[in-house]
Image (spheres, rainbow, N blue to C red):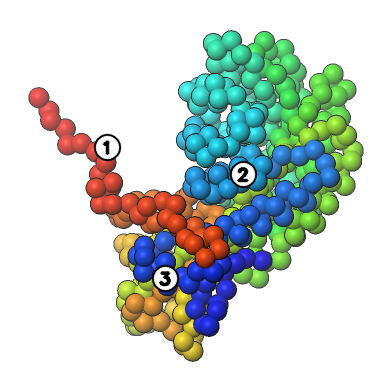
Amino acid sequence: MNHFEYRHHVLHCEEVPVPLIAQGVGTPFYLYSSATLTRHFLAMDQAFADLPHLTCFAVKSCSNLAVLNLFAGLGGGADIVSGGELFRALAAGVEPRKIVYSGVGKTPEEMRYALLSGILMFNVESSQELAALQAVAAGLGVKAPVALRINPDVDPQTHAYISTGLAKNKFGLPIEQAAAVYEEAKGLSHIEVVGVSCHIGSQLTSVAPFVESIHKVIAFIRRLTGLGITVKYLDMGGGLGIRYDQENPPEPAEYAAALKQALAEAPGCTLIIEPGRVIVGNAAILVTKVLYTKSGAKHFIVVDAGMNDLARPSLYGAHHAVLPVMERGQGQMTADLVGPICETGDFLARERPLPESESGDLLAVLSAGAYGFSMSSNYNSRPRVAEVMVRGDKFQVIRQRETLASLIQGERIPDWE
Ligand code: LLP
């Protein structure tokens, strides 16, 4: 459930009519509903209320300070994958002891920053990374808390670009190698083994792959116990999908029930989850304005948002529903919804029944909260759009639209002397 709905044929975000915001901030803009963000965070977090757990929001899915701050206020932690995300999480008020650091390519500088910040743990993905972390921790005279990321070789049945738990993916350690790397970790002076982690992919629409992988991870934890290694944290990553179109993903409660059943076999472990999309995906829309329409072999609706603002359709062929902001009894037409970018791959929807539109109409691109703004770029030298948050009958800009000056900030014409 989300808080975007029509009232008297005008799309509202909570109590605020969307056209009012467009008047105030211009278009395009991302529009977040704080009630929806809160509801989705709590649905996920409370589904695990009866066992020791920590919900670490995947910052990469939506990294605006206001959004991170909202989850921090609800007791959330953060799953980060860069020094930049650590900086954001700390600036937003996330407690360092609730931050887990994932990713295959952490640099020594990033490791140092995270160690000095006192994060909960590093999800380490290779033996070389472990050695690098040991060296950085030794230099600082501290112990680095570590979970090794296991690659369980489970098919998440999702888009190939966002599958991470297959043996052929770059992520994690094959289970067969992982025990040896744990033994290695145990012998390192500045490493403290605290957990096991795993993340098999994103936008999963059934619980079966999660169940298959948690069973593999728990069997692995038992093996570790046999080797005299005990772990405190079992990090199962994120990945629960949402409905963009016709998908029927499990509800958080169903997902939680499946994980909890398996977890009964791993008593004493605190569960960590790293949800991103399921919390923010349907909590935001992208509002864009129709510039022109044109027809030839096909119909095109040209809007002021493009693939630089929302990359998912171009990059993954992803489906995002499109609704008119004002319902005025318009029919539908099969058309491509395209942006101003100079590439044929620049589309937000292709060959879809779309609201019959004319210049000046506002359209809402739905389910844009996850990997929407956070993947946007300045391609074609387009300033990144504004982000706005609604709470009840109020709205506030949570990220200003970039200016033309911001586009060239830091650039310099060399003066070869
Ligand atoms: N934890 C780790 C280690 C991850 O790599 C990811 C996502 C998550 C958690 C959060 O997954 P979620 O709950 O959001 O599915 N840009 C793509 C999605 C990339 C996902 C990358 N990793 C998209 O727009 O679909």
- Few, some or many residues within 10 Å of mark 1 (<14, 14–19, 20+): few
Horizontal side of 380 relative to 353 (left or right) equals: left
The residue labelled by disc 2 is: 73
The residue labelled by disc 1 is: 410
Looking at this rendering, what residue extends furthest in the front direction? 393
Residue 218 shows in the view: yes
Looking at this rendering, what residue extends furthest in the left direction? 417
Of mark 3 and mark 1, the one earlier in the sequence is: 3
The residue labelled by disc 3 is: 20
- Between tags 2 and 1, which lies in front? 2
* Residue at mark 2 to residue at mark 1: CA–CA distance: 34 Å
Q: Tag 3, which secondary structure?
A: helix
Look at the image and tell me in which quarter the C terminus lies.
top left
Mark on residue 96?
Answer: none
* Residue at the image position 41 percent from the left and 51 percent from the top: 399
Residue 82 shows in the view: no
* Residue at the image position 50 percent from the left and 69 percent from the top: 16
* Amino acid type for the residue under numbered disc 2: Gly
* Residue at mark 3 to residue at mark 2: CA–CA distance: 28 Å
Is mark 3 in CB contact (under 8 Å) with mark 1?
no
* Amino acid type for the residue under numbered disc 3: Leu
Residue 32: x and y, percent?
52, 59
Horizontal side of 266 relative to 375 (left or right) equals: right
- Few, some or many residues within 10 Å of mark 2 (<14, 14–19, 20+): few
* Amino acid type for the residue under numbered disc 1: Gly
* Residue at mark 3 to residue at mark 1: CA–CA distance: 35 Å
Is mark 2 in CB contact (under 8 Å) with mark 1?
no
* Residue at the image position 47 percent from the left and 76 percent from the top: 325
Residue 360: x and y, percent?
34, 77
Q: Tag 2, which secondary structure?
A: helix
